[in-house]
Image (tube, helix red, strand yellow):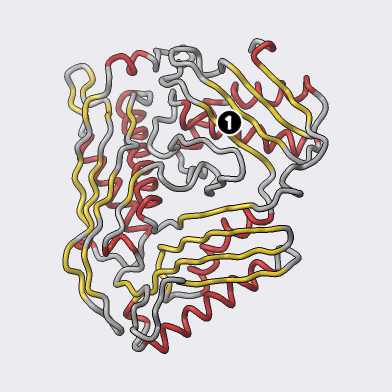
């Protein structure tokens, strides 16, 4: 890597510690946008494994164009009914023929999507969601960027961004969703959390889809949301000093019984559509007061798509600079150029409280040189992407 492409800027302190306000959001696993991310990535992993098993290497594909069209339900206390199923349209491109041999891309895509939803959303009946694959044949130009035994070349010009460490607000917002779902069975997988911190005050807004069969009356519904509020306040207070306020299902009108009641624990059952890349970034968060890329990480191929790989490399490099060089804070930005080797970004910018420029360059280089291992971990499902 040419050192002239690397810029290191030194910070005298962690900028987040004095930053106010701080906004952090997480869309839970059942949110329509996150569901699309999960489906897209499950399809990419399924295709990658098939290509490896049948042809000895991952072939070009991008499945990051999944769209979800909401269904229709009639929720009622004690249990209502599903009227129209959720519809998932699987878009993107894949290598569909190899030496005149057909690759069953549509069957693989639908199977992967179905398996992902079945294992992720407990309360969703099989007939409450339907899948349609419209995968096209991959671009011949992008196919060539995979190479044949050489270092793959970037199949896009884009920017990857990562930072470390996560702030206290980041940790609280990212961890609260799973805590709520684990402790309160009446809440479904669609939990959205937004944190707003000003100085040492944190206000959390939680949208938690309550499942109708768990609550017989509006009074029981209120008990559930009160439980969510208490749990969220305790969870946050245990992880930060300062005042914590929590609002749960802020749009509810208890007097008219207009509340966030669902049949399946998903807002997608009744009017909330979804798309890949519209939600969480690669660290599982949406951080408008911190650096972030607009690239979707889910569904992009794990071999040459820098929109996926560079965001992960930047995140991992920032984390290593903090851990190994004792930095309080680090941001890493990587700029790719289509057609260039993926191990050689056009430009790298690092902002950090660490002072050893050469060690910083070596750590970023090490992450870029380890892309084969990163690809392996992605295909194995061992890397957080959303």
Where 11 falls versus 82 (above or below)?
above
Q: Position of residue 272 (x, y in %)?
A: 31, 58
Where 229 falls versus 334 (above or below)?
below
Q: Position of residue 203 (x, y in %)?
A: 61, 65
> What residue sits 68% from the left and 41% below the top?
164
Q: Is residue 31 left or right of residue 125?
A: right
Q: Position of residue 280 (x, y in %)?
A: 48, 47
Task: Place residue 122 in its image quadrant.
Answer: bottom left
Q: Position of residue 51 (x, y in %)?
A: 32, 29
Q: Nearer the viewer, residue 71 or 101?
A: 71
Q: Is residue 247 left or right of residue 276?
A: right
Mark 1 nearby-residue class (10 Å; few <14, some 14–19, many ≥20): many
> What residue sits 58% from the left and 71% below the top?
246
Where 106 falls versus 118 (above or below)?
above
Task: Place residue 78 in its image quadrant.
Answer: bottom left
Q: Nearer the viewer, residue 122 or 20?
A: 20
Q: Badge 1 is on which residue?
A: 313
Q: Is residue 370 left or right of residue 191?
A: right
Task: Place residue 239 in its image quadrant.
Answer: bottom right
Q: Is residue 94 left or right of residue 33?
A: left
> What residue sits 16% from the left and 68% below the top?
83
Q: What element does badge 1 sit on? A: helix
Q: Nearer the viewer, residue 233 or 47?
A: 233
| Picture quarter with the N terminus | top right
Question: How many marks on residues?
Answer: 1
Where 132 falls versus 365 (above or below)?
below
């Amino acid at each position: 890597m040419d050192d002239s492409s690397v810029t290191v800027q030194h910070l005298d302190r962690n900028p987040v510690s004095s930053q106010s306000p701080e906004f952090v959001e997480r869309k839970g696993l059942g949110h329509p946008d996150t569901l699309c991310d999960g489906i897209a990535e499950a399809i990419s992993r399924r295709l990658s494994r098939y290509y490896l098993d049948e042809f000895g290497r991952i072939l070009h594909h991008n499945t990051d164009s999944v769209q979800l069209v909401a269904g229709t339900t009639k929720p009622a206390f004690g249990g209502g009914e599903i009227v129209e199923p959720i519809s998932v349209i699987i878009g993107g491109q894949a290598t569909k023929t190899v030496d005149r041999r057909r690759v069953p891309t549509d069957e693989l895509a639908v199977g992967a999507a179905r398996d992902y939803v079945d294992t992720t959303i407990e309360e969703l009946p099989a007939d409450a969601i339907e899948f349609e694959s419209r995968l096209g044949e991959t671009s011949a130009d992008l196919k060539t960027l995979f190479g044949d035994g050489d270092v793959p070349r970037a199949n896009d010009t884009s920017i990857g961004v990562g930072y470390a460490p996560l702030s206290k607000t980041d940790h609280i917002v990212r961890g609260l969703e799973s805590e709520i779902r684990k402790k309160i069975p009446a809440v479904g997988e669609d939990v959205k959390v937004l944190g707003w911190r000003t100085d040492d005050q944190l206000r959390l807004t939680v949208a938690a889809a309550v499942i109708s069969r768990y609550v017989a009356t509006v009074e029981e519904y209120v008990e559930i949301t009160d439980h969510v509020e208490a749990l969220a306040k305790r969870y946050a207070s245990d992880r930060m000093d300062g005042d914590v306020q929590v609002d749960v299902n802020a749009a509810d009108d208890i007097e008219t019984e207009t509340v966030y009641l669902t049949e399946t624990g998903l807002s997608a059952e009744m009017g909330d559509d979804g798309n890949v890349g519209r939600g969480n970034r690669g660290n599982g968060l949406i951080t408008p007061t911190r650096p972030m890329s607009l690239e979707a990480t889910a569904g992009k191929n794990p071999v040459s798509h820098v929109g996926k790989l560079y965001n992960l490399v930047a995140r991992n490099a920032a984390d290593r600079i903090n851990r190994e060089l004792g930095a309080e804070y680090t941001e890493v930005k990587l700029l790719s150029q289509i057609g260039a080797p993926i191990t050689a970004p056009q430009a790298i910018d690092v902002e950090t409280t660490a002072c050893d420029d050469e060690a910083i360059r070596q750590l970023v280089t090490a992450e870029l040189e380890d892309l084969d291992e990163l690809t392996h971990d992605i295909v194995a499902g061992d890397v957080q992407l959303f």
